[in-house]
Image (cartoon, rainbow, N blue to C red):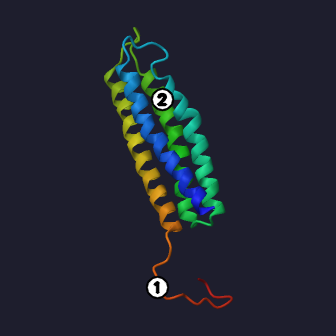
Amino acid sequence: MRKAFVIASTLLLVAFALQFVFAAVGAFTKPAGDGAYALHSVTGTAIIPVLTLLTTLFAALAKAPGRLIGLAILPLGLVVLQALIAMLANASTDASGTSTALGLTIGGLHALNGIIAVHVVVAVQQAARKLTAPAPADAAPVAVREGEPA
């Protein structure tokens, strides 16, 4: 299960990296129609949530520490926050539908939250890899008596 945890967390990291590429594709598509951000939207609303759930499941099955399991599910909350930020930014336009300073500021938080999410996924992926690393040859085994905390 630990290898599955590494694979899922790596795929999640790749999906987040592609998210930035897809955002750039949307930003540079001319003319920018309704479909300019389609890949970005699908990745953010479907692929990343599914990969986050799989990563969390494999973390639990790999008997990862509770904090790591919690960290593994955190990107799902950040994706929900992303959607809320995007909705707020889009709703913060003037009567003619033109962007406002407030809307652009809120939109900037969308990018910042994405960067935070990537850092979380990098931490999860690194911790997953650490779990699969073999113990050093010179490490002394730790004896644990029954009934004592490990």
**Residue 40 circle label:** 2
From what the image shows, is residue 150 above or below residue 109? below
- Going by the image, does 104 lie left or right of 72? left
Q: In the image, residue 115 lies at what x, y percent?
A: 38, 43
Q: Quadrant of residue 145?
A: bottom right
Q: Residue at x 48, y 36 (%)?
A: 82
Q: In the image, residue 39 lies at what x, y percent?
A: 50, 27
Q: Amino acid at mark 2?
A: His
Q: What residue occupies the far front of the structure in this picture?
A: 137
On the image, numbered disc 1 is attached to which residue? 139
Q: In the image, residue 10 lies at what x, y percent?
A: 50, 50
> How crowded is the residue under tag 2: few (<14 C-alpha within 10 Å), some, or many (20+)?
many
Q: Amino acid at mark 1?
A: Ala
Q: Residue at x 53, y 50 (%)?
A: 74
Mark 2: which secondary structure?
A: helix
Q: In the image, residue 70 lies at what x, y percent?
A: 56, 57
Q: Residue at x 44, y 36 (%)?
A: 18
From what the image shows, is residue 149 above or below residue 48? below
From what the image shows, is residue 129 above or below residue 98? below
Quarter that holds the N terminus = bottom right
What is the distance, in whole Å, between disc 1 and disc 2 at their CAs?
A: 46 Å
Q: Nearer the viewer, residue 109 or 135?
A: 135
